[in-house]
């Protein structure tokens, strides 16, 4: 068994490179493979084979610790930098309200789902301990409000076991694919749906004109200085967050030990909160211009290395209980959809607004532009903007959801 971290890191890097290289090939086998298994899932699952078949001994590896403490906060910093709250507020009240309602549907949907299980099937899930259902669901809430980086952050905050986390990754992939397919079908029948619901399209048409004129982002070719600035901001904020967390976590543990149940004595909790807060603050400065020279691409490299290091800890032979979590995901997604549809119909919002608000939560920045462009190409920048905003507040919202689910479970 391979136990040296430099060799393990080399294997992970090779796997990531091979996945991305083959995903671009035109060979029918690879096109079919990646049509059904997304790149992110491949990067997560393939390293798990190294662990499952005893090729690598990850029990003593420090790679995941380094990735979660250094790459994770640096990645979040760069993702949050491009959020533009002012522009979002100028896009019209309906779409902003729908996005907030979509997020609310996820936040309250988790506790409601657990309440339903407590009433009708209390013996089907674990309620207490390290593999309690609410812990895993907290990571799914973070992904559905924000993205994978937020999901991994919640995994660390609530110490979610690897096998439970692997199930939640699977639930997310399955329902994200199903929901996106449904929304794309809606896009093909948008005019008919809007006609039946009596949607008010005036603001929608203004929105299209506005985004075509003012929301195009000019990408520049980055040079060495740009990469150095991206590096310094990402890890500078990470260092600042560690310094703050090293002070706040012990302070709360010593003076307010009762706040442990709210994770306020967790070092990682404060690490992520500080990173998120500083990232939002920097998004109002010229630092946000780093997005135009590839800050999000650099953060994506960090994210995939983090995902691969997590996959290395998973043992595929230990994944069970997927069916019950599939049901949890279905009920949860239904609650979310109900919130969006009911409010959307009440305010006579176009189906494009409802689809965009929902997909920016469930799918995130990777897939929301696809759904947006299915309705109109000028909606893609708005989809990215909402998705990035989701990164910024997902940690806060998922924490609220998790604490409500903890209360239900106890």
Image: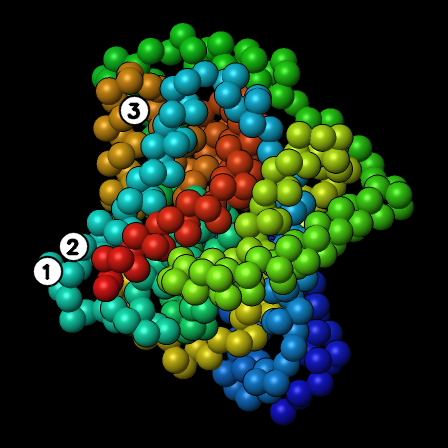
What is the CA distance from the residue labelled 1 to the residue labelled 3? 30 Å
Q: In the figure, 348 relative to 122: above or below?
A: above
Disc 3 or 2, which lies upstream in sequence? 2
Residue 328, horizontal then vertical, whole percent: 26, 57
Counting the numbered discs, the total is: 3
Left/right placement of residue 410 relative to residue 75 reads left
Residue under numbered circle 2:
116
Residue 348, horizontal then vertical, whole percent: 29, 16
What is the CA distance from the residue labelled 2 to the residue labelled 1? 6 Å
Which-is-in-front pick, marks 1 and 3? Answer: 1
Q: Residue furthest bottom?
A: 1
* Residue 179 image label: none
Asked if labels 2 and 3 touch by Cβ distance under 8 angstroms, the answer is: no
| Front residue of this view, candidates 304 and 283 | 283
Residue 33: in sight, yes or no? no
Residue 277: in sight, yes or no? yes
Residue under numbered circle 1:
120
Asked if labels 1 and 2 touch by Cβ distance under 8 angstroms, the answer is: yes
Q: Label 3 crowding class (10 Å Cα cut-off): few <14, some 14-19, many 20+?
A: many
Quarter where residue 193 is shown:
top left
Which-is-in-front pick, marks 3 and 2? Answer: 2
Residue under numbered circle 3:
344
Element marked by disc 2: helix
Asked if labels 3 and 1 touch by Cβ distance under 8 angstroms, the answer is: no
Residue 180, horizontal then vertical, whole percent: 40, 42
């Amino acid at each position: 068994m391979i136990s040296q971290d430099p060799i393990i890191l080399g294997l992970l890097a090779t796997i990531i490179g091979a996945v991305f290289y083959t995903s671009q090939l035109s060979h029918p086998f690879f096109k079919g493979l990646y049509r059904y298994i997304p790149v992110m899932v491949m990067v997560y699952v393939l390293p798990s084979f190294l662990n499952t078949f005893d090729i690598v001994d990850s029990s003593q590896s420090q790679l995941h610790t380094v990735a979660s403490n250094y790459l994770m906060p640096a990645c979040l910093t760069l993702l949050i930098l491009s959020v533009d709250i002012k522009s979002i507020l100028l896009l019209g009240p309906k779409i902003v309200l729908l996005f907030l309602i979509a997020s609310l549907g996820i936040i309250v949907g988790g506790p409601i789902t657990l309440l339903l299980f407590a009433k009708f099937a209390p013996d089907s899930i674990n309620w207490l301990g390290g593999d309690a259902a609410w812990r895993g669901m907290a990571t799914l809430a973070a992904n559905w409000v924000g993205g994978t980086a937020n999901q991994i952050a919640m995994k660390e905050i609530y110490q979610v076991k690897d096998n439970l986390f692997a199930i939640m990754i699977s639930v997310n992939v399955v329902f994200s694919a199903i929901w996106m397919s449904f929304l794309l079908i809606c896009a093909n029948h948008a005019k008919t749906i809007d006609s039946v619901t009596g949607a008010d399209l005036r603001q929608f048409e203004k929105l299209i004109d506005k985004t075509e004129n003012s929301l195009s982002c000019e990408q520049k070719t980055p040079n060495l200085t740009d990469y150095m600035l991206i590096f310094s901001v990402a890890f500078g904020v990470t260092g600042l967050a560690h310094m703050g967390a090293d002070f706040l976590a012990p302070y709360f543990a010593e003076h307010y030990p009762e706040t442990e149940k709210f994770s306020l004595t967790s070092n990682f909790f404060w690490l992520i909160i500080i990173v998120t807060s500083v990232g939002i603050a920097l998004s109002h400065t010229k630092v946000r211009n780093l997005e135009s020279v590839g800050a999000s691409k650099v953060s994506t490299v960090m994210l995939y290395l983090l995902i691969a290091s997590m996959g290395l800890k998973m043992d595929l032979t230990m994944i069970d209980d997927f069916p019950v979590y599939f049901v949890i995901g279905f009920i949860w997604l239904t609650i979310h959809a109900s919130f969006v549809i009911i409010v959307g119909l009440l305010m006579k919002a176009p189906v494009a607004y409802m689809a965009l608000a929902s997909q920016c939560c469930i799918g995130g920045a990777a897939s929301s532009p696809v759904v947006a462009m299915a309705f109109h190409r000028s909606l893609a920048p708005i989809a990215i903007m909402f998705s990035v905003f989701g990164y910024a507040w997902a940690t806060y919202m998922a924490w609220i959801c998790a604490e409500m689910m903890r209360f239900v479970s106890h």
